[in-house]
């Protein structure tokens, strides 16, 4: 029997499945999610999936790194009114996109040897490189609270807003001593989207930029600030490229398509 709950699907392209696991780890809230949503298609969590119905919302994790990812993504986009990219891979290309600088034949040879040619691999790129994305929720993995906020907004009929402030803001609110200023560490908090409550610097570990960059970062001011503490522009860009290479590595270095 039909119900009036939003029909949703949760999908993984090439990925570690960490964002889907983060959803499954919403232990206290999972029963409420299951009651509020009509989960039609979620291969990782249920056996009986419906892969034809039109969906109100599709959540997509992972990066496009094989032609089958691309086919799956186009099929998902056709079925979904709203597409939400979840996780830094889907939003920025994630760790997989770092490999784009290396020529494909060298990569294949180094990983699989001369004889084996089993993967139809392509340069890893985020979902928005191929289809329209309505909402982007980065994080490696996504933050549970942010995911729940996104779902709550959508259930109320609103488009969620991912607030654009930096990890530094959260770090300051926690009254941490700054690792750049005090220790000259390459901490990417000033350029990185918040949401983790400055998890790493709060444990004395520099931010590695796993949420990807904030919009409109004060890049030049940050470069100057880093420079006064002995950190170069290359240091910052190299670290920021670990999770968001397409945003930080010049196009000319990205591999052939
Ligand atoms: S964003 Fe992180 S957690 Fe999500 S699929 Fe990519 S590597 Fe895994
Ligand atoms: S430690 Fe890192 S995140 Fe915290 S204020 Fe300094 S640069 Fe920003
Ligand atoms: S502090 Fe930086 S690297 Fe650590 S979880 Fe937050 S965004 Fe990711």
Image (spheres, helix red, strand yellow):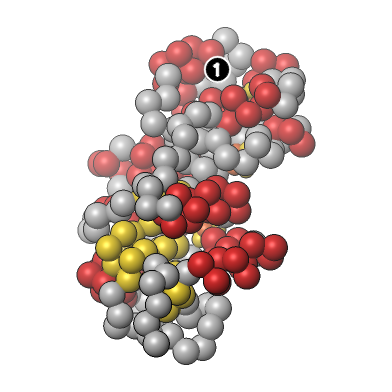
Total of numbered circles in the picture? Answer: 1
Q: Residue at x 41, y 63 (%)?
A: 59
For this rendering, which residue is in front, 139 or 6? 6
Residue 225 appearing in the image: yes
Outermost residue to the right: 203
Around disc 1, counting alpha carbons within 10 Å, would you say few (fewer than 14), some (14 to 19), or many (20 or more)? Answer: many
Vertical side of 221 occupied by 162: above or below: below
Q: Residue at x 50, y 29 (%)?
A: 165
Residue 239 appearing in the image: no
Q: Position of residue 153 (x, y in %)?
A: 45, 50
Q: Position of residue 13 (x, y in %)?
A: 41, 68
Q: Residue at x 42, y 19 (%)?
A: 218
Quadrant location of the N terminus in the rendered image: bottom left
Q: Quadrant of residue 187?
A: top right
Quadrant location of the C terminus in the rendered image: bottom left
Q: Position of residue 207 (x, y in %)?
A: 62, 35
Q: Position of residue 240 (x, y in %)?
A: 49, 37
Q: Quadrant of residue 73?
A: bottom left
Question: Residue under circle 1?
Answer: 226
Vertical side of 251 occupied by 135: above or below: below
Q: Residue at x 52, y 43 (%)?
A: 211
Specify whether 221 is left or right of 117.
right
Specify whether 234 is left or right of 81.
right
SS type, badge 1: helix
Vertical side of 240 occupied by 225: above or below: above
């Amino acid at each position: 029997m039909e119900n009036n709950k939003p029909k949703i699907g949760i999908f993984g392209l090439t990925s570690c499945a960490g964002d889907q696991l983060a959803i499954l780890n919403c232990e206290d809230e999972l029963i409420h999610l299951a009651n509020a949503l009509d989960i039609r298609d979620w291969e990782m969590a249920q056996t009986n999936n419906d892969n034809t119905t039109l969906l109100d919302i599709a959540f997509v994790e992972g990066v496009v790194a094989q032609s089958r990812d691309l086919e799956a993504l186009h099929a998902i986009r056709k079925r979904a009114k709203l597409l939400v990219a979840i996780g830094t891979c889907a939003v920025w290309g994630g760790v997989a996109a770092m490999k784009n600088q290396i020529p494909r034949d060298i990569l294949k040879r180094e990983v699989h040897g001369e004889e084996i040619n089993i993967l139809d691999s392509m340069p890893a790129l985020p979902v928005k490189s191929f289809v329209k994305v309505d909402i982007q929720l980065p994080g490696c993995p996504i933050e549970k609270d942010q995911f729940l906020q996104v779902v709550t907004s959508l259930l109320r009929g609103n488009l969620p807003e991912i607030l654009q402030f930096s990890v530094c803001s959260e770090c300051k609110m926690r009254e941490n001593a700054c690792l750049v200023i005090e220790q000259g560490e390459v901490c990417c908090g000033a350029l990185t989207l918040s949401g983790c409550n400055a998890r790493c610097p709060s444990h004395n570990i520099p931010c590695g930029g796993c949420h990807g960059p904030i919009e409109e970062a004060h890049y030049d001011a940050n470069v100057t600030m880093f420079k006064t503490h002995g950190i170069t522009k290359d240091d910052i860009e190299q670290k920021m490229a670990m999770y968001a290479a397409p945003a930080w590595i010049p196009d000319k270095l990205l591999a052939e398509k």
